[in-house]
Amino acid sequence: MPGIEAAEPWPARPYGLAVTAKDAGTVYWTITRASNTAPAAADGEHLAEQPAPDLPGGGKAQVAEIEQALLTALAAGPEKDTIARAERYSTRPIPPGFRYGVTVDFTDGWRLFATCVGTARRGEKLAEHRHYKPDETV
């Protein structure tokens, strides 16, 4: 995806993901899921095609745009027909406890939560950055 340099497993979490913006920092996500919690999908309900994020590259990683990149990748991926709907946390009128993240509802009742737990500027380690949320706070 344009503007994304890398998206790879983050071993600090059992289901972690590290997404690095081109020539910028990295955003760290933890992914959890729950069965039979998603509202039932209406007949033919599927996640709509998503707009590409605006990731110009360089500087600080834009967390909200990387949040959109996650949705864009899901909507274009091979499992797209199994996704009923998704919602970004940062676009809610009142975001939940974590400002950035995505809730994804699947047609089989599974619900996936991808939550941003920290960011790091290029060359920094996550634990050195003030926005890191240690394990005991997640």
Image (tube, rainbow, N blue to C red):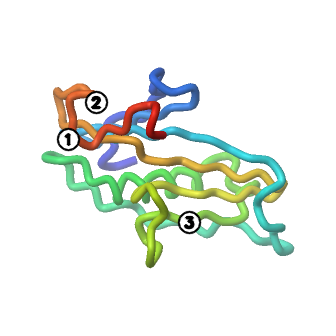
| Mark in front: 2 vs 3 | 2
Q: CA distance from mark 1 to mark 3?
A: 25 Å
Residue found at x 35% / y 59%: 64
Looking at marks 1 and 3 on the same chain, the residue that comes earlier in the sequence is marked by: 1
Considering only vertical position in the picture, is 138 above or below 81? Answer: above
Residue found at x 59% / y 50%: 113
Residue found at x 46% / y 58%: 97
Q: Which residue is mark 1?
A: 24
| Residue 83, picture quadrant | bottom right
Residue 22, image x, y percentages: 25, 41
Considering only vertical position in the picture, is 28 above or below 98? Answer: above
Q: Is residue 68 left or right of residue 118?
A: right
Residue 62 circle label? none
Q: Which residue is mark 3?
A: 87
| Mark in front: 1 vs 2 | 2
Q: Secondary structure at mark 2?
A: helix
Closer to the camera in the image, 41 or 81 = 41
Hey, which residue is sitting farthest top in the picture?
11
Q: CA distance from mark 2 to mark 3?
A: 26 Å
Question: Dot 1 surroundings within 10 Å: few (below 14), some, or many (20 or more)?
Answer: many
Residue found at x 20% / y 41%: 24
Q: Secondary structure at mark 3?
A: strand
Q: Which residue is mark 2?
A: 126
Q: Is residue 34 left or right of residue 20?
A: right
Q: CA distance from mark 1 to mark 2?
A: 14 Å
Residue 110, image x, y percentages: 77, 51
Amino acid found under the numbered disc labelled 3: Glu
Considering only vertical position in the picture, is 33 above or below 44? Answer: above
Hey, which residue is sitting farthest bottom in the picture?
93
Residue 26, image x, y percentages: 29, 38
